[in-house]
């Protein structure tokens, strides 16, 4: 069943009504060719999803009646932030699309010493709008209950300062030969709620950056025995976390 994310204020619980606006109106009417009486799922981006029935269709909005709230469990049991060194071309779009499918909660693009891409404020805003649209479409396709957040582009210093907001901060480093994601997770027997994984751009991180990151409580980790492309590394991390929390831990209970 088709799923759409709406703003929280679009949900009127007392009136049992949800109003869909924006580009989704055209998708419902022209692409899906939906009609009054058809059912669809609406999510408020805060993990609340509802089965609804179309009651009203206008040029700029679609009004839906809430049938009932859905009880879904599709999210990872921890909030994962992927900090991605800005890559060349459209690789960031791939990271956001597939990272959303794999359960990422936040994406933080950043600039480091080996970043090639340079964005001015106008280009940055357009890119973030584009990335947000990609995240929304991927979240709908993968039946997420939460719409991932796309942060503004961070400087290296800003990224370092974010580490204090997480239970565990990891940084992927090609010269790390022993420490893995699973090994670090086992150091927290009481569980982790928020985790940050930093991925370098095409040239990776310098030794100086790794030293600085370590001083800010980042833990260098290896991502398998092979050297991964920048657009693959974060997806590897998300897949490893999904396996650890959604298969290993569930299988042991």
Image (cartoon, grey):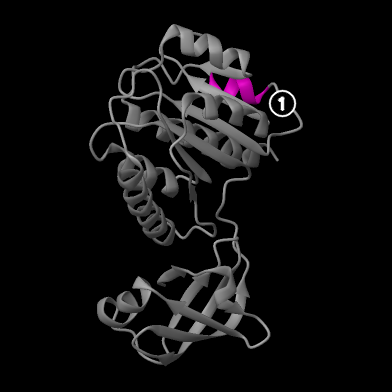
Q: Residue at x 50, y 32 (%)?
A: 240
- Residue 51: x percent and y percent? 54, 77
Q: Nearer the viewer, residue 140 or 44?
A: 44
Q: In the figure, residue 102 lies in which quadrant?
A: top left
| Residue range corresponding to the magenta coloring | 180-186
- Residue 160: x percent and y percent? 56, 24
> Is 212 rendered above or below residue 137?
above
- Residue 170: x percent and y percent? 55, 24
Q: Is residue 173 visible?
A: yes
In the rendered image, which residue does mark 1 sit on?
Answer: 188
> Is 19 rendered above or below residue 81?
below
Mark 1 Cα shell of 10 Å, populated few (<14), some (14-19), many (≥20): few
Confirm whether the magenta stretch covers residue 185.
yes
Residue lying furthest left in this view? Answer: 89
> Is 21 rendered above or below residue 164?
below
Q: Nearer the viewer, residue 73 or 41?
A: 41
Q: Is residue 179 visible?
A: no
Report how many numbered discs are placed on residues in the image. Answer: 1
Q: Residue at x 62, y 42 (%)?
A: 78
Image side of residue 165 versus residue 92, left or right: right
**Which quadrant is the C terminus positioned in?**
top right
**Which quadrant is the N terminus positioned in?**
bottom left
Q: In the figure, residue 230 lies in which quadrant?
A: top left
Image side of residue 32 versus residue 76, left or right: left
Query: What secondary structure do most residues of the magenta stretch adopt?
Result: helix
Say what secondary structure mark 1 lies in. Answer: loop
Q: Nearer the viewer, residue 134 or 150?
A: 150
Q: Residue at x 63, y 45 (%)?
A: 77
Q: Nearer the viewer, residue 60 or 12?
A: 60
């Amino acid at each position: 069943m088709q799923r759409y994310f709406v703003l929280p204020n679009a949900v009127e619980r007392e009136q049992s009504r949800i109003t869909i606006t924006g580009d989704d109106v055209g998708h419902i009417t022209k692409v899906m060719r939906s009609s009054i009486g058809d059912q669809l799922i609406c999510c408020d981006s805060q993990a609340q999803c509802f089965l609804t029935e179309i009651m009203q269709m206008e040029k700029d909005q679609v009004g839906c009646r809430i049938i009932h709230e859905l009880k879904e469990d599709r999210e990872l049991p921890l909030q994962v932030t992927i900090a991605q060194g800005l890559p060349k071309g459209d690789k960031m779009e791939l990271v956001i699309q597939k990272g959303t499918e794999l359960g990422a909660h936040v994406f933080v693009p950043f600039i480091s010493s080996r970043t090639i891409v340079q964005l001015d404020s106008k280009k940055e805003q357009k890119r973030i709008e584009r990335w947000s649209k990609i995240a929304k479409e991927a979240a709908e396709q993968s039946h997420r209950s939460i719409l991932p957040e796309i942060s503004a582009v961070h400087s290296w210093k800003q990224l370092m300062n974010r580490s204090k907001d997480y239970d565990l901060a990891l940084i992927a480093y090609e010269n790390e030969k022993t420490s893995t994601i699973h090994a670090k997770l086992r150091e927290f027997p009481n569980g982790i709620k928020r985790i940050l994984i930093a991925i370098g751009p095409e040239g990776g991180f310098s030794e100086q950056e790794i030293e600085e990151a370590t001083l800010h409580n980042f833990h260098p980790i290896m991502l398998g025995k092979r050297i991964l492309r920048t657009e693959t590394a974060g997806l590897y991390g998300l897949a490893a976390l999904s396996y650890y929390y959604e298969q290993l831990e569930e299988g042991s209970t």
